Image: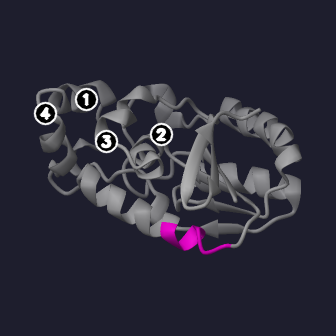
Amino acid sequence: MKILFVRHGESEKNVQGVTHNQGDDSALTAAGRQQILALAVKLKKYQPAAVYCSNETRSRQSAEIIAKNFDIPVVVSEKIGERQLGEWAGKPWKEFEAELNKMDLKERYTFVPAGGESWQQMERRLSEFLDGLLKQKGGCYVVLTHGGAMRALIPLLEKGDLAKSFAYDFTNAEVLVADYHDGKFKLGKLE
């Protein structure tokens, strides 16, 4: 089985440099649509069977562009949404990051911003999604999600420590290729 984890195309809030609110309607920019259209061409050789996406507008729009190019279904799942940041939503990412950087890794993992969720809680729902997807037998699937969610997936996929997630910073429309065989993932980049 091959899973192509994709960060959505550029959104309006990405351009503004602020964090998303859960359920906001920030759409893809014209550049974001072009990023995903260009990516769809690169995905031709993989022939995905379905596209899974979060329920956020930017993710759904990205998924619909890819699905249209392959005439495949889009499956929406709240489990692959970005971390709920609560009171930090809508603020510059750099402010939230500055607060997180004051904490050690264990504190960061369990820290719950008021009205939001911890990294640990996000990881739990991502793991539930992944367990369900792995019940598919073979094939290739696109999972349209978010940068933070993709970083949180790294320790799950590699069965490694949390610090591994800091080695990744996914840009818009970037792909993480995960080959699953004999109960293990091998991670790579799009060829």
* Secondary structure of the residue carrying numbered label 2: helix
Q: Earlier in the sequence, mark 3 or mark 2?
A: 2
In the image, is 123 to the left or to the right of 50?
Answer: left
Q: CA distance from mark 3 to mark 2?
A: 18 Å
Amino acid type of the residue tagged 3 in the rendering: Asp
Amino acid type of the residue tagged 4 in the rendering: Asp
Q: Earlier in the sequence, mark 1 or mark 3?
A: 1
Please tell me whether mark 2 or mark 4 is closer to you in this view: 4
In the image, is 63 to the left or to the right of 93?
Answer: right
Amino acid type of the residue tagged 2 in the rendering: Gly
Quarter placement of the N terminus: bottom right
- For the residue carrying disc 2, how many other residues have a C-alpha within 10 Å: few (<14), some (14-19), or many (20+)? many
- For the residue carrying disc 1, how many other residues have a C-alpha within 10 Å: few (<14), some (14-19), or many (20+)? few
Q: Which residues are magenta?
A: 131-136
Q: Earlier in the sequence, mark 4 or mark 3?
A: 4
In the image, is 191 to the left or to the right of 169?
Answer: right
* Secondary structure of the residue carrying numbered label 4: loop
Q: CA distance from mark 1 to mark 2?
A: 14 Å
- Which residue is labeled 2 in the image? 147
Residue at screen point 28% across, 48% down? 85
Q: Earlier in the sequence, mark 1 or mark 2?
A: 1
**Callout 4–callout 3 Cβ contact below 8 Å:** no
- Which residue is labeled 1 in the image? 97
Residue at screen point 62% across, 55% down? 143
- Which residue is labeled 4 in the image? 104
Q: Earlier in the sequence, mark 1 or mark 4?
A: 1
Q: CA distance from mark 2 to mark 4?
A: 21 Å
In the image, is 120 to the left or to the right of 5?
Answer: left
Amino acid type of the residue tagged 1 in the rendering: Glu
